[in-house]
Amino acid sequence: MLISILDFYRRPFGLALICFLLYNFSTVLLKTKLTLQGVAYFFFCNDKKWPKQPCPSTYFKDVNAKDEKIKRKTLIFVRHGESTWNDTFNKGAHRSKAKFVIGFIPGLVKSLSYEFYLLLAGKVDSWFYDSPLSYLGLDQVKELCAFLRQSPEAVATNPDEKLMLEILRKDPKAPKSILVSSSLRRALSTVAASFQDRLARNPDESILIIPSLQEISRNPDTLSITPAQTKVAPSWIDESYTDCDFATIFGGQVDMHLHRGNKPIDTNGYKRMKEFCNVAFSNIQEEYIIIGGHSIWFRSFFKEFLPRDSNHVGKSKKLVNCGAVALDLLKINDSDDGNGVDRYMVDEKSIRVIYGGFK
């Protein structure tokens, strides 16, 4: 009797499911493509592996820091808020190990349920692929936004910190700066919401998407869901957030002309970090570059471009969610005639935490 009842309800459910999938056939095809792409990256991408590079200080040891051969840019790393992927697979600082372990299976079921709902609803969205900010991530972004709304005079403890805050806010007398971001939604959403006041005061300003900032990992959360040369769409979580109009910012103040889609499967993190350095000095006029990005990319950057004998915490610890840290990046050409290879190094003494820190 029970089996007959189950059979009675199973068939209509199956038919309804097939109808939903056929109605959203284009989304099903895209999700299938993304899934296959994610599997290919996971098994065949060596994004975190690259040949050992020479110590950066090798190329700077015989020159003075003020030598005109050395070019300098100030980078301000801003890590994204917690993502849905983090919510499912990472313990985070907000919960104990025991709580994470106990809640892992229920959390995984929740995330899979969301993924299934998004598929049936025909939304080009995902919990796992190009994972967006979680609700906790939006709270972290809100705190950073509130910090930036404070007067630099009231928050800063020294002149340099005051200058950094003025640059982040783009105050009238501050040196010129530019907002750039990874193509991944959690990074862009963090920049858009954290700097929404700056963007509102400067309607002609845009957030420049730089593909080489895409996170260093083989996991599907590090792959972009946004096709090349198209606008990023707010996630279903972004759309529920009332403290920032993501749709307006994404539609009118995000420059996607450099976005080429996903990182190539034969790339690696070092290639992209070096490519970003080239872009920073060759394609960006502003001296100060505010970068919305990712923890492994930032940590790898410190490992590769700080001297090998440096023990800076940035080499071993992640920048906290929505943390901000400034550093000076130096550039020199290894040939006297300027036709050699451009070399880069982080000036360790220039590293200063603006908000949050490493953990």
Image: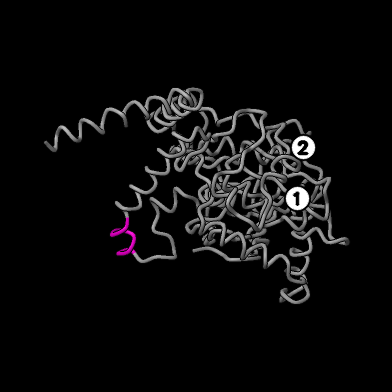
Residue at 61% across, 37% down: 212
Q: In this view, does 14 lie above or below 90?
A: above
User: What separation in Å lies between label 1 and label 2 (alpha carbons)?
Assistant: 14 Å
Per the image, label 1 sits on a secondary structure element best described as: strand
Please indicate whether residue 345 sits to the left or right of residue 286 in the image.
left
Mark sitting on residue 72: 1
Q: What's the residue type where badge 1 is placed?
A: Arg
Residue at 58% across, 59% down: 322
Per the image, label 2 sits on a secondary structure element best described as: loop
Q: How crowded is mark 1: few (under 14 residues within 10 Å), some or many (20 or more)?
A: many
Tag 2 residue: 283
Q: What stretch is highlighted in magenta?
A: 97-103
- Percent across and percent down for residue 91 are 39, 58
Q: What's the residue type where badge 2 is placed?
A: Asn
Please indicate whether residue 294 sits to the left or right of residue 93 in the image.
right
Comparing labels 1 and 2, the label whose residue is closer to the camera: 2
Queried whether the magenta region covers residue 102, the answer comes back as: yes
How many marks are shown on the rendered structure?
Answer: 2
Mark sitting on residue 17: none
Residue at 44% across, 22% down: 22
Please indicate whether residue 218 sits to the left or right of residue 61 in the image.
left
The N terminus: image quadrant: top left
Front-most of 162 and 146?
A: 146
Mark 1 or mark 2: name the one nearer the start of the chain.
1
Residue 251 figure quarter: top right
Q: Residues within 10 Å of mark 2 (few under 14, many from 20)?
A: few
- Percent across and percent down for residue 283 are 77, 37
Residue at 43% across, 28% down: 20
